[in-house]
Amino acid sequence: MVGPCRPQRKGHVSSWDFGKTAARMRDGVSPSRLRSLDYSVIQQCMHCGLCLPTCPTYAATKVERHSPRGRIALMRAIADDELEPGRLFAEEMYFCLGCLACMSACPAGVDYAELFEQARAEIEERRLLDGIWRRLVRTLTIRWLFSAPGRLQWLARLLRLYQETGLQHWVRRSGVLRLLPVRWRELEAMTPTVAPAFSDDLIPPVVLARGRRRYRVALLTGCAQDVLFSEVNRDTAEVLAWNGCEVHVPRHQSCCGSLHAHNGELRLAADLARRSIDQIPPDRFDAIISNAGGCGSHLKHYSRLLQDDARYRDRARLWDRKVKDVHEWLVAIGWEAPGGNAHPPLVVTYHESCHLSHGQRVVEAPRQILRSLPKVTLVELPEANWCCGSAGIYNLIQPVMAQQLLERKLARLRSTGATVVANANPGCLLQLEHGIRKAGLPWRVVHPMTLLAEAYRRVAAS
């Protein structure tokens, strides 16, 4: 039984809350985000259980607290002052994938994404999982590496040198890795291949429209996408130009803040949102294009991050309206289906990025584009919108559950008979590539924009 209902207005803290918050602040305890949150957001959950069959962690464990309903009950107990946030609560929030499948299933429209981010932010502010090693890793990665694009590119260049000189191949064959702990060996095996060139090297600042210009758009190149899948950004720019878009690609783009918001660093995420808005003023473009499902879901909610910032509030609302997933945008403007058949037939299946499907509700558009490709047979993937276990950095912090989900996904992929797996999120692409490589399967993992760009190039060459 959860506590009494205390409906309150957005942003309003009652005198009952204020007294308790003030006391906690005097005692040196951070005020609770969940207790200060609009109570109707938490109260909206009806505990009907329709989310349970869609939740990967509940499906694997059948433990109630590992379900969206169970996690919301914990959050509500904190909001009702019946439970103090502690380590068990923190571990549960980080056991959650944040895949948002529960939001697609929920008949009440519960905004689990906001609850999830606020809960993790409270965990970090209260340091409920604090430790020297964890603090060091988070400081070096989330707060330092991914807060400035130059730092990530610098590290990526070092990794590229390690790979291209053959040193990585020698290290793996020498047996020296056997001296490392098992988890370190697993992480080394997951090391991604750095792109030979980054987006700014592959794409000019402005890509002119092919034929008559119909739209002026900005292309977001991302951070991990930039250093690992820069060719996807190049292919996206070409596809947009083919369809009448003048594509602007600002140099040295910042991280969108998705990684930070999903891992409890909401203040840093807000700073990165301001930086993005300054770098790409939304009033100058017909659309701001994202080709990464996880980033796009976050990018469409800058107004929530900046709702209390008088300087950026209105621009953030305009930004949210202008951000479009590339598949969504192409279908909206009417993309040109490529002709010709200058390649052998392909059997393709499509694995949905969780945040593209459940977060952005972009489900049919990628399929429409894939079906338009000449000599391509699209085979529907069973459980196409079931998480592959990547979930941002989930496969790094929860390797056991992530591996279970990856094995489940590979089994469903095998059942299709496809040789090409299409997906529109860099984290998923990395997770699938790792699993396929480890299993020794001869499949290609590719972004839909790459398949479409290849088809357009064949048309141009014919």
Image (cartoon, rainbow, N blue to C red):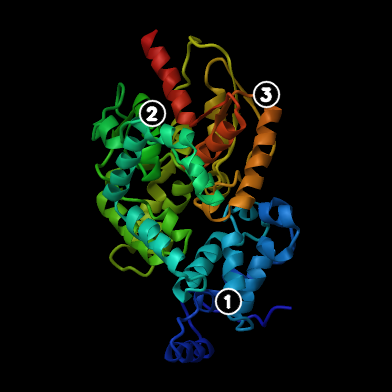
Q: Which mark is residue 86?
A: 1
Distance between the alpha carbons at the discs numbered 2 and 3: 26 Å
Q: Residue at x 45, y 90 (%)?
A: 27
Q: Position of residue 135 (x, y in %)?
A: 42, 66
428, 325: nearer the viewer = 428
Q: Who comes first in sequence, dot 2 or dot 1?
A: 1
Instruction: Give the mark toward the camera: 1 or 3.
Output: 1
Q: Image check: 395 left or right of 303?
A: right
Whether residue 300 sits left or right of residue 371 in the image: it is left
Q: How many residues crowd around disc 1 within 10 Å: few (fewer than 14), some, or many (20 or more)?
A: few
Q: Residue at x 49, y 43 (%)?
A: 177
Name the element at disc 1: loop
Mark closest to the chain's N terminus, 2 or 3? 2
Q: Give the secondary structure at mark 2.
A: helix
**Residue occupying the point 35% across, 42% down:** 220
Image location (x, y in percent) of residue 388: 60, 43
Q: Tell me the mark number nearer the camera, choosing from 2 and 3.
A: 3
Tell me if residue 336 can be seen: yes
Q: Indicate the quadrant containing the N terminus: top left, top right, bottom left or bottom right.
A: bottom right
Left or right: residue 129 compared with residue 242: right
Q: Nearer the viewer, residue 147 or 35?
A: 147
Please state, as top left, top right, bottom left or bottom right, where the C terminus lies in the image: top left
Question: Callout 3, which amino acid?
Answer: Gly
* Dot 2 amino acid type: Asp
Q: Determine which residue is flagged by label 2.
A: 235
Give the amino acid type for the residue marked by disc 1 in the picture: Gly
Q: Which residue is mark 3?
A: 417
Compared to residue 454, the image places residue 334 above or below, namely below
Which label lies toward us, 2 or 1?
1
Local packing at callout 3 (Cα closer than 10 Å; few below 14, some 14-19, many 20+) is: few
Residue 309 position in % (x across, y down): 33, 68
Measured from the top left, where is residue 224 in percent x and y? 39, 44
